[in-house]
Amino acid sequence: MPTITINDQTVTVEAGKTVLEVAEELKIDIPTLCHNKALEPYGACRLCVVEIMAGGRPGLSTSCTLAATDGLVVQTDSERVERSRRWTLELLLARCSKVPVIQTLARKYGVNDTRFEKDDQDCILCGQCVRICKERMGVAAIGIFNRGAQRVVSTPFDEFSDVCRKCGACASVCPTGCIDIDRYSDKEADVLPSEWNEGLCPTKPVSISFPQAIPKLPVIDATACVHLNTGACGVCADNCVAKAIDFEQQDEVMDLEVGSIIVATGFDALDPTPMKPYGYGKYANVFTNLEFERLSNATGPTSGELLLRDPEDRFKFTRKPKSAAILHCIGSRDVNYHEYCSRTCCMYALKYAHLLKDKCGHDTEVYNFYIDMRCFGKGYEEFLNRVQSEGVRMIRGKAALVTDQAITPEEKGMLVVVAEDTLSGQVLRVPVEMVILCTAMEARADASEVARVLGISTGSDGFFLEEHPKLEPVSTPTTGVFLAGACQGPKDIPDTVAQAKGAASEALALSARGEVEVAPMISQIDPDVCIGCQVCIALCPYSAIEFDWRHKVSVVNEAMCKGCGSCAAYCPSGAASIRHFTDKQIFAEIEGILAA
Amino acid sequence: MLTKLLPEDLEKVAKATEQRLASFRLRLMLCAGTGCVSSKSFDVQKALRIELERQGLQDEVAIIMTGCNGFCAKGPVLVVQPDNIFYQLVTPEDVPELVEEHFKGGRPVERLMYREPGKTKPIPKMSDIQFFKKQQLIALRNRGLIDPEEIDQAIAREAYSALDKALNSMTPEEIIRVVEVAGLRGKGGAGFTTGTKWKITAEQPGDVKYVICNADEGDPGAFMDRSIIESDPHAVIEGMIIGARAMGANNGFVYIRQEYPLARERLATAIAQARERGLLGKEILGSDFDFDIAIHRGAGAFVCGEETALIASIEGDVGEPRTRPPFPAESGLWGRPTCINNVETWATVSEIIRHGSEWFSSIGTAKSKGTKVFALVGSIGNAGLVEVPMGITMRELVFDIGGGIPDGKKFKAVQTGGPSGGCIPESLLDLPIDFERLREAGSIMGSGGMVVMDEDTCMVDVARYFLEFLREESCGKCTPCREGTVRMHDILTAICEGRGTPEDLDTLEQMAEYVRDTSLCGLGATAPNPVLSTLRYFRDEYEAHVQHRQCPSRSCPVLSPAPCQSSCPAGIDVPSYVALIALGRFQEALDLIREDNPFPAVCGYVCTHPCESACKRRDLDSSVAIKHLKRFLADWEAEKKPAVKEGKPIRSDDQVAIVGAGPAGLTAAYFLAREGYAVTVFDSMDRPGGMLVAGIPPFRLPRSVIEYEIERIASLGVKVETGVRIGKDLSLAELREGGFKAVYLAVGAYQEMRLEVAGEELPGVIGSLDFLKDAFSRKITCLDGRVVVIGGGNAAIDCARTALRLGPEEVTVVYRRSRQEMPADADEIEIAEEEGVKLRILTAPVQVEGENRVTGMKCIETELGEPDASGRRRPVPIEGSEFTIEASTIITAIGQVPQTELLSGDGGVECDRWHQIVIDSETTQTSVEWVFAGGDAVTGPATVIEAVCAGKKASKTIMHYLHGEELKDPAPIPIPRLRVEDSTAVGEDERATLERPEMPTVDPSQRVRGFELVDLGLSEEVAVREAHRCLRCDVNR
């Protein structure tokens, strides 16, 4: 193990390390612009020079390429080093006079200005982009062309590259941020829209899903990761100090033994794309309610600013709208979609109206197109009054159409909302810049699958069915399975919280008691009679019958059996019966009734 | 059909080939190197073949197309063996004569033989030519002796015998040991010890190793690698096989640039023939060693000569260097141990194996062994390729082998080591050339380019040129080299264009050090050499550019739009007035001259015309006769006598006193009076004119001419008071009290310098000025006996010519250095000799002999030693060589000093120990605020035009002073005042053929009879034609 001395500190280091790596471990700051842990040492920017005092050829050498060999003595901040660094920075500053990274670094080393004529280039030719493309992405779509002052990064013959997959690795390592990948390929970039931000902005294949994620750890999107798809890249693993990246990790199936299950699978927001009249997906500035939520969120793509989307670039937001329309009941209370009321829209629509006024200025025109306002909660009516007093236009009438076809000059370039004002009986055309669709809450697409697994049922609207609407609003027919939140039906947050607390206490009640009380009228299967045909198992709606493979008979789980009698009614051998409701007893009862 | 050779076959092949060649009576070794090929040597070959066949000589005379002979400037070169007769510049038209006279008749053709520069005697034998004499050929051993496309001829010259030795009687370790002990160092430029490199490569683990021959020669003006490959490719191949054997490599590459098609072709042919002969491929020469060579073509990037960049290029990557270590010897081509050597190094290897390490290490200097091939190019008589032992001096190389600088120009510097080398100045001409010394001098050996530069080369421009090359050729990978070369080039361009500042020099110096220290590879590390070495040795040229905005070599176009004008101390607009003469507008021409010089006529007669030395027409034939043209204008005016143009009305409140009515004082008076200042000129003599009348003989400058020009100046309102000696008759303080607000001292230099030898006081010894005064005033009317004039300046020549007219037996000028060092004008010396003046050079006076009167002069012979402070070589007396020249009159003309004792006393101006008045050179101000000074009193004896310059400059500062303005004026770039259209009277083609007219003169025998004017002047017709010879660089450059 070699021993080297940096700035009078003598340390023993692992063989094969460079001086730059050793300095980093020692927390000695050495500036560099072309070094990248994921890439082979390049030694081009010459900022990381150190002075070799002994143990090597005396003079300046780049620490990124200088091996930490035994007996080496270097100084990272000698006068000669500093002078050389200042020169490099002055020359870079002259080349890239407007690049903030260079300006900051230059100032840090005392170079506030350059004596040379200022150029306005943005590339410092550190070669990181070219190297990552070749070394890590295995593509070499871009390269370095020409010599000397004419040196540039480009694609062969300055034409669009066939091999570039627009992964953006080049741009991600560029220290000055000068890479425009559209210059390298005319392919549509494989952009990964951010799920958390409702696709309003892109995200990277490896990211922390959302700021409040628990556990707050990055995950790799296996569908988009270059390494998992091509075997190239793997840069994240090289850069991870903790060596925590494991490309071998797979989905796991876990068996958990639990006493109760709370189903809180939530809802799906209705996709308004098929509802052609509203122009969602066609017009850039028709948003769904959830998209609007992300826009107004401080951690969202616009840092909470309510901005219009650039029709040319869906990830670009431009300016605040001067007018907006909020369309209620999109997919709710509509025989073509869902007949039920989604319960939350009226109130959040009012909130949106308020936010628009608040964030975009009170001269912003906000229209609410509603069927009727259902402000039933505590303080809700007061909020409606307040919003109205802020100048929000309430138009009673469901919007029929959103279009960009202008018929008057004022409508030019606007989205026109067409609706009948049912109070005045007139058809209105309201030109606005932004349209927000209050889409329906609907059952999750896979709700029936979940219901089957859990042995619960769904209603005609697709939501999970509670055991009893009044007496057992959180329970399900399957004992130990409880419902919480919008998976049971549209709900707002207070209702959801209340129900969730109810479900939690139901589950707690079970475990607190330590035992389960079951009704006496449950099924029993006589093992001596059972022929092991297993028909009952398929029939049991509560999954209460299992098969005993040793004795080759069906066995009733008494804790789960509800005594519905399906098994008893069907059992071909007559092995199954309901306690207290044996055939004999039933017939006796019938006879008794008939006799009376 | 060639067959695979075994060791014992080599000698057989050699013998057979020798016999075959010996069967020819004559062998014509015709050079087919790239230089000669482009001079059409193949046409000569064809003509020779036809002519020989026609004469039936084809079986007696063989034509052998050889590789480069080295003397490329004289190509096509033909050497006739076995007599070694050297013919140069042979054309197909010469062939019949050659065949008839020489090859058939046995009478060599003198017309085509080489002659030393400036000599007429032909040198028939190649070995007698200086260019070849001092050369020692190792790498170039077979140049001009074999046909490189015929392997058997190489074998006949011992090729592959070293390979046999290395393969069959030496172990790899022994081979390396021999190369190591020989002290061979890499000749690509860095000079790393070849043996060490081989050893490191050999010691690396692994079976796969490579050897590479670096033939990516990219230096401008360097072509030794090309020449070696073209003339003897087998030397390279043999060296590579031996090296590969020693290091255990089985594959080799030659990286050769695409721009060398002929070399590549010959190399490919040689490799193919070697392969057929079993010298490459499997089981070479019957041994168990396998080796083969592939040619890789480089795409012409200079940086690919750097070994890591070269490797990257072979690997198919962008040719860019990477940081070392690891060195290629450890990890090179495809990560394998790789040994890269230059062509010349490889070509040397086999000779070392053949003759042993002791033989090799006996050649050269302590640390640099053997020889080096240099490409001598630039401003040099014998341009070409030479191989000389290390340690030879630059002087031998340039002057003995190279034949010195052509056209009588002065040597300035040698640029060695290619673009990233440095410039070696004249003071280091005796530097022995080896790796270490060159590095100490701030240059490098590089691949061996030597660009010789003469006085017309601007060193700033040279640095700029090389930086331009490097800027283009820097790969651009690392910041210092990429950005630094661009910025240094920008600064140098700014300096060349007169936009530089003194701070720029510091910036350049610091930046050069930074680029050298911080760059990634050798290109960047040496890129600042041109800047650093020129700054080190030619800082004065840089300073002239940044401080005075002048290019001393008149080569920077912006600073020197017209070289004639910028070389004129007074900055006269020469191109415009010459153009006006061509158009016949003589009055305008005169008016234009008078904008800068009140003495057009005087200068027309006696100016030393530095303008003509700078004239670009000189490069074509001879300079435009500018002085004669000015003289023509003066004569024209004297005939016409046009009215004098009025200046501005005189304002008597700004009075200026001028002391001394010589050219400096009168010029100052002229420019001040033109602007309306009241000027009074005081002079101690009885007539104005100063040195014009006291020092210049009337046969050169008629007195009427001086009087006319002084009259013109007086007519502007200038008062001239003669017979008044300031300091004696009037003090400076009294001038001040008398209302003069400023005083200009232009008192000249009239005090004769003494010889400081015994007997100087004897009658018959007379100072030059006293003699001239007495002669002009007819106080002396005749001289008897012999006259000796001591000195080498214009005054000495004037004295000699004047003395000659007084009828003595003989006039001899004695001068202590050689004729070359004489300060007098060369044409004046020539005229004096023509008239009968004898010249005795390299002779110094020791003692004046005689008792009551001079009878002789004891002298001693001298020789030239080391250069002194003035840059001229010092005369060293040769002991025991004393002799006496008989003389009845001795005129001393070794210089004059000013008489300033009366001015420098209490309250006076400060003078130095030579009595010269000390001034601020930028403002002409003396130590007394209101007193200014100039002319000979400040500089010592100088020329009329310099005096005019001094007076003109002083007039400007005095005006600034009187107005209370800043005295310093940035020196203007002399740019033509007018843009005169070109005359169409003479067509362009005709102009090119016009010849400079001779000045008609009185016959020498007539001249010496009196003091009549010698030069008769040009006629109008001749003058106008002459003016058409001007190339008009003011508009065309």
Image (tube, helix red, strand yellow):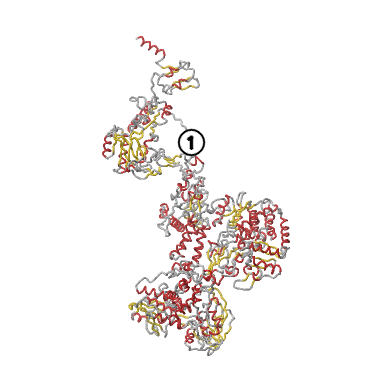
Where is residue A524? Give x, y as percent: 43, 18
Taking depth in this image into account, of A207 and B60 the one nearest to the observer is: B60
Circle 1: residue type: Gln
State which quarter of the image contains the N terminus of chain B.
bottom right
Q: Secondary structure at mark 1?
A: loop
Q: Dot 1: few (<14), some (14–19), or many (≥20) neighbours within 10 Å?
A: few
Where is residue A173? Give x, y as percent: 46, 48
Q: Quadrant of residue B917?
A: bottom left
The answer to whether any part of residue B943 appears in the image is no
Name the residue furthest front: B985
Question: Chain letter of disc 1?
Answer: A
Taking depth in this image into account, of B226 and A1 the one nearest to the observer is: B226
Q: Is residue B292 left or right of residue A42?
A: right
Taking depth in this image into account, of B184 and B284 the one nearest to the observer is: B284
Residue B91 against residue A230 in the figure, above or below: below
Residue at horizontal 71%, vertical 53%?
B3
Taking depth in this image into account, of B99 and B174 the one nearest to the observer is: B99
Q: Is residue A9 left or right of residue B282?
A: left
Q: Is residue B587 left or right of residue B98?
A: left
Q: Total number of numbered labels? A: 1
Name the residue furthest bottom: B852
Where is residue B728? Give x, y as percent: 39, 84
Where is residue B483? Give x, y as percent: 47, 57
The answer to whether any part of residue A492 appears in the image is yes
Residue on which disc 1 sits: A250
